Image: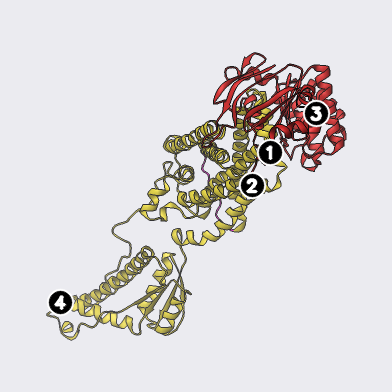
Amino acid sequence: MKKLFYCVYKEYKVLVRDKAALAVTFLMPMALVFIVTIIQDSTFKSVNETSVPLLLVDKDKDSLSFKLESALVQTRFFEVIKIDISEEQTQTLVAEGKFLIAVIVPKEASKQLREKAKARISKLFPDMDSAKKAEETAAVELKLFFDPITKQSFKVSISGAIDRIVSAIEMESMINTLGEELKTILSTTISPKFEKEPLVIVQQEYAGRDQTTIVPNSVQHNVPAWTMFAMFFICIPLAGNIIREREDGSAFRLLTVPGSYLNVILGKIFLYLLVNLIQFILMVCVGIYLLPLLCLPKLDIGNNYITLLCIAISSGLAATGFGLLIGTIANSQDQASLFGAVSVVILAALGGVWIPTFVMPEAMRSISSISPLNWGLEAFYGVFLRGLGIGAIFIHLLKLIIFFLVCVAGSFYYQTYKRIR
Amino acid sequence: MVEIKGVTKQYKNTERPAINNLTLSIPAKSIFGFLGPNGAGKTTLISMLCGLFKPSAGEIFINGNNISVNLRAAKQIIGVVPQEIALYARLTAYENLLFLGQMYGIETNELKKRITENLQIFGLEKNAHQQIRTFSSGMKRRVNLIAGLLHKPQLLILDEPTVGVDVQSKTAIINHLKNMNRERGTTIFYTSHHLDEAEEFCSHIAVVDEGKLITEGKTADLIRNNNCNTVEEVYLKITGSKFRDY
């Protein structure tokens, strides 16, 4: 036990005096969280929140366009900008990416709608004099322009929202016309009132177990994602440390000391696991205290701290195991740095660090589940977003620990049967 | 002290064995020079003596213990000074020695005393708390040597301990090793390409070439029996002048 302590202390001294390794270990992931969170914030907002800029070109300037504008604003999904320009100019603005979507309400659209409503209603009462006069006119045509980069799913949801608004206006217009017709037929002064409240309400909730709703946003995704990345990136200094010891003969000397080398390896695992935990705490602090200073959402870690610690330890073990394996197999520091960096970037991309798995195609989503970074990230999501306990995320922790054991066993095998021939 | 009996080491995917049926006896309290050209198998034998590599055939006994059976007992009495500067560049000389001594299980107060003594002997007391990366080659070599001596080994294995050092450092190293051998009876197994140094330092010499033992004996006997004046003459006479590492 004493020897293990000496090994940990030695590793600590070596690490704290290596400023470059410290920067890679602590500053790089913090910088990444800052930069990527800021960059991705608007993307997450477009997925999760409101304020899609919408250009409304009002040629009608009557009840239809006024009601449409008011309804669009009320949804809080659109930021309505009104400009009086031609159809060609509208198309150009959207094509240039100035607006994601534009709606053109044509001239006399309200009048046309009223006439069309009257014609429809008059068909309900064919014997009436007024009905004889009303003739069916062409349908009112609202034009929607979408930016070509708009995703199909986004286009469908926006078209759906506008369709619903237009249907409501259409319905209101029909009811009003019907009211007027009834007044004429029944010679009454009672006007029918159009009730806007929907008959069927669709209630939406996030399926968190503790009934809380934590909306996924750039911070909730990026802090755990880049924490996992930083944890695994530790494989580079750790592998470098192992190779340096082998190259400078220290490993040779330590292998000649009775019963010491296991302590040396355990010392490395213990120290780098500790570094991983410090990274985790630092990244969480960045999410809670620093990101809100940049007008970004505050990281909500829920209150399941023990589970979070278990995830951090399991992820840290997986990361140190990976570093140990690279350090054992690689023949030089260059090889370890290159392989370590590339493999972590690939595992991160697969695991949903760069782009969340929920926006990946189905095939990639299946592949992403082979990445240990994905296991850790899913476990963090479980706690941060779904409020799950340790039981529900245990499978991810188990995978991480098995990965650690496989890496350690692989290192041991390689060291014993390949390197020491 | 060390009995090497019919040891062969064949690496995978190589045509000839690095060590070929080597039988050698290293007497206790001797300074044994193990000489040979590059690729002769010197480092392979050192690795096997330390238990890092297992022989493909044959047995090695250290103080009567077969190291394939009881490596731990053998490791307790061995001190190794590798050819590389096997120290942590970002630790100070004192921290390096403290860590390595602790790994041998030396009691802390006794260890600190030994470190201070050795640093004084090798003229490094003023540099004790400087990081190794700031040291000259000679200073690094001296600390490298101290690291192998702290646990007072009965058998000290030195792989080219004076390579790349100035005359002053070389003299200090050799003199200290001689004192250890004389005063404590430490057996020294030594490899070097400095044949004049070997002649002056070693009581016994063995010459190996291409994994095979060519000759061995007491240094003076070896020179006399080969009708030569120096170890270097003997060496060239029996190994020839052909390059080995082409």
Q: Which residue lies under the disc numbered 3? A: B199
Q: Quadrant of residue A168?
A: bottom left
Q: Which residue lies under the disc numbered 1? A: A248
The chain shown in red is which? B
C-alpha span from label 1 to label 4: 99 Å
Q: Which residue lies under the disc numbered 4? A: A125
Q: Is residue A154 visible?
A: yes
Image spot of residue A419 (x, y percent): 56, 35
Same chain for marks 1 and 4? yes
Query: Start and end of the magenta stretch?
Result: A295-303
Q: Is residue B130 visible?
A: no
Residue flagged by tag 3: what amino acid is it? Glu
Q: Is residue A12 left or right of residue B17?
A: right
Foreground pick, A178 / B211: B211
Q: The disc numbered 1 marks a residue on which chain?
A: A
C-alpha span from label 2 to label 1: 26 Å
Q: Which residue lies under the disc numbered 2? A: A26
Q: Is residue A195 left or right of residue B17?
A: left
